[in-house]
Image (tube, rainbow, N blue to C red):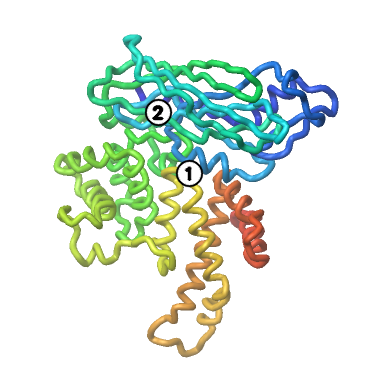
């Protein structure tokens, strides 16, 4: 079993629109937003609702709630579903109904039941009456994100093989129910997988949040250690790598035990240094962990801060984003930019001084951090749709200042410089 396979993308905006387009009459449908993706121009009576439709998405992409709720108006959320997990790996079951009936107060009332069958046909204890949306405001055609998610993982006594997830959604207002089955293969191990031919560590990191493959995380150290630009980098330049691995290890706790066990087997010096650096950062608050790095090196290590004073601290946030695709790292970077915005231009003024002070003033450092934050936001928004979506959502927020809104417009309009011919 090669865990890099088994992923598929679900663009809910496109899926719903394609389905509704086939049913619609002229002028009957109007695309509205990520939450209200489409609805009829004339409200229908409950008796007109013919079928209850929903998607069941098994996912190891744990930022799904951010993807759903932080994707702004007009931009359909895109999820990655998986059909294959490792032993003990967490699997989230997303149940996303649509076309639910609405009562006179524009409320929906929707629950679901989940029955899981093991490969031998035996059943796990069923979960009944889980919340999708209980007495909640909604619109016709609206996709509902479940109020209760099921997190599934196998224990040491559970057999490997195909697990069947049977989901039954109950639309209480419409008096309807519907059932779907989804199968997921569970492997007999969570041990590291051999890297595929032509494995590119930089590309793997950059796209990890789209298709999480944690079983490559330990073998990737060997590949990275053979790239001089990574292996020879000073510890304060590893911010993105440290944030990346910290998030992966938090999402997959079983990996930390494997990484600790892997370290004594490493014979390549550059790989050993990389593993030591990551462990020293991830376990920095663990008093029982004997940090293998020299104290002088540890002092150079970037640490999280709401007021960063180094580029490595910004890179920690980018590493966290790439490992999970979550909204919080992007929000944190925007917050830094907004806090440091009053210092814009201080760096240029400092450079023009004929006599410079021995110690660089903090406002100058903050101006440099501001420049780095804005450049990184623009560069990554250019490369990653989700960064653009999150920034667009922040820009549309009612509590953002006019100055910061304009800054984000400039960030979203950023384009890489074209080299001279």
Of circles 1 and 2, which is in front? 1
State the residue in front, 153 or 290: 153
Residues at marks 1 and 2, CA–CA distance in whole angstroms = 18 Å
Q: Which is nearer the N-term, disc 1 or disc 2?
A: 2
**Are dots 1 and 2 in contact, CB under 8 Å?**
no
**Pointer 2: residues within 10 angstroms few (<14), some, or many (20+)?**
some
Residue 286, compared with residue 204, is above or below; it is below
In which quarter of the view is residue 42 placed?
Answer: top right
Residue 409, x across and y down, in percent: 66, 58
In the rendered view of the protein, which quadrant contains the C terminus? bottom right
Residue at 42%, 23% (x, y): give it.
127
The disc at residue 316 is: none
What count of labels does the image hold?
A: 2
When the figure is inspected, residue 68 is found, relative to residue 349, above or below; the finding is above
* Quadrant containing the N terminus in the rendered view: top left
Residue at position x 73%, y 38% in the image:
32
Q: Which class describes the residues within 10 Å of circle 1: few (<14), some (14-19), or many (20+)?
A: many
Residue 4 is marked as 2
Q: Which residue is located at x 63 percent, y 31 percent? A: 108
Does the rendering let one see residue 75? yes
Q: Is residue 282 left or right of residue 315?
A: left
Residue farthest toward the top in the current orientation of the protein: 121
Q: Where is residue 226 in the image (x, y as percent from the top left)?
A: 29, 45
Q: Which residue is more in the foreground, 265 or 17?
A: 17
**Residue 392 appears left or right of 151:** right
Q: Position of residue 258 (x, y in %)?
A: 22, 38
Badge 1 marks a residue whose secondary structure is loop
Residue at the location (14% across, 43% down)? Answer: 264
Q: At numbered mark 2, what does the secondary structure look like: helix, strand or loop?
A: loop
Identify residue for label 1.
325
């Amino acid at each position: 079993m090669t865990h890099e396979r088994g992923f598929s993308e679900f663009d809910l905006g496109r899926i719903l629109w394609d389905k509704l387009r086939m049913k619609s009459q002229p002028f009957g449908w109007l695309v509205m937003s990520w939450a209200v993706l489409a609805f009829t121009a004339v409200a229908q009576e409950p008796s007109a609702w013919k079928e209850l439709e929903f998607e069941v998405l098994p996912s190891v992409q744990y930022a799904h709630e951010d993807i759903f709720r932080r994707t702004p108006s007009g931009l359909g959320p895109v999820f990655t579903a998986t059909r294959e997990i490792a032993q003990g790996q967490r699997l989230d079951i997303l149940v996303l109904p649509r076309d639910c009936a609405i009562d006179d107060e524009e409320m929906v009332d929707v629950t679901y039941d989940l029955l899981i069958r093991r490969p031998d046909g035996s059943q796990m204890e069923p979960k009944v009456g889980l919340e999708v949306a209980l007495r909640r405001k909604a619109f016709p055609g609206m996709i509902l994100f479940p109020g209760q998610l099921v997190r599934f993982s196998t224990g040491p006594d559970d057999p490997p093989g195909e697990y069947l997830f049977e989901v039954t959604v109950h639309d209480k207002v419409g008096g309807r129910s519907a059932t779907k089955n989804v199968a997921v293969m569970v492997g007999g191990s969570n041990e590291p997988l051999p890297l595929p031919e032509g494995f590119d560590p930089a590309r793997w990191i950059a796209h990890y949040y789209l298709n999480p493959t944690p079983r490559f995380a330990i073998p990737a150290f060997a590949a990275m250690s053979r790239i001089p630009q990574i292996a020879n980098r000073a510890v304060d330049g590893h911010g993105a790598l440290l944030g990346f691995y910290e998030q992966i290890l938090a999402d997959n706790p079983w990996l930390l035990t494997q990484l600790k066990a892997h370290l004594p087997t490493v014979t390549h010096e550059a790989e050993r240094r990389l593993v030591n650096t990551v462990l020293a950062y991830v376990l920095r608050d663990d008093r029982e962990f004997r940090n293998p790095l020299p104290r002088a090196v540890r002092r150079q290590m970037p640490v999280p801060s709401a007021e960063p004073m180094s580029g490595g601290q910004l890179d920690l946030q980018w590493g966290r984003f790439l490992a999970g695709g979550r909204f919080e790292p992007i929000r944190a970077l925007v917050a830094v930019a907004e806090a440091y915005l009053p210092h814009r231009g201080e760096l240029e003024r400092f450079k023009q001084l004929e006599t410079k002070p021995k110690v660089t003033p903090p406002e100058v450092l903050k101006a440099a951090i501001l420049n780095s934050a804005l450049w990184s936001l623009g560069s990554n928004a250019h490369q990653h749709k989700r960064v653009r979506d999150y920034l667009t959502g922040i820009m549309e927020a009612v509590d953002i200042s006019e100055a910061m809104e304009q800054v984000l417009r400039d960030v979203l309009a950023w384009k890489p410089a074209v080299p001279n011919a």
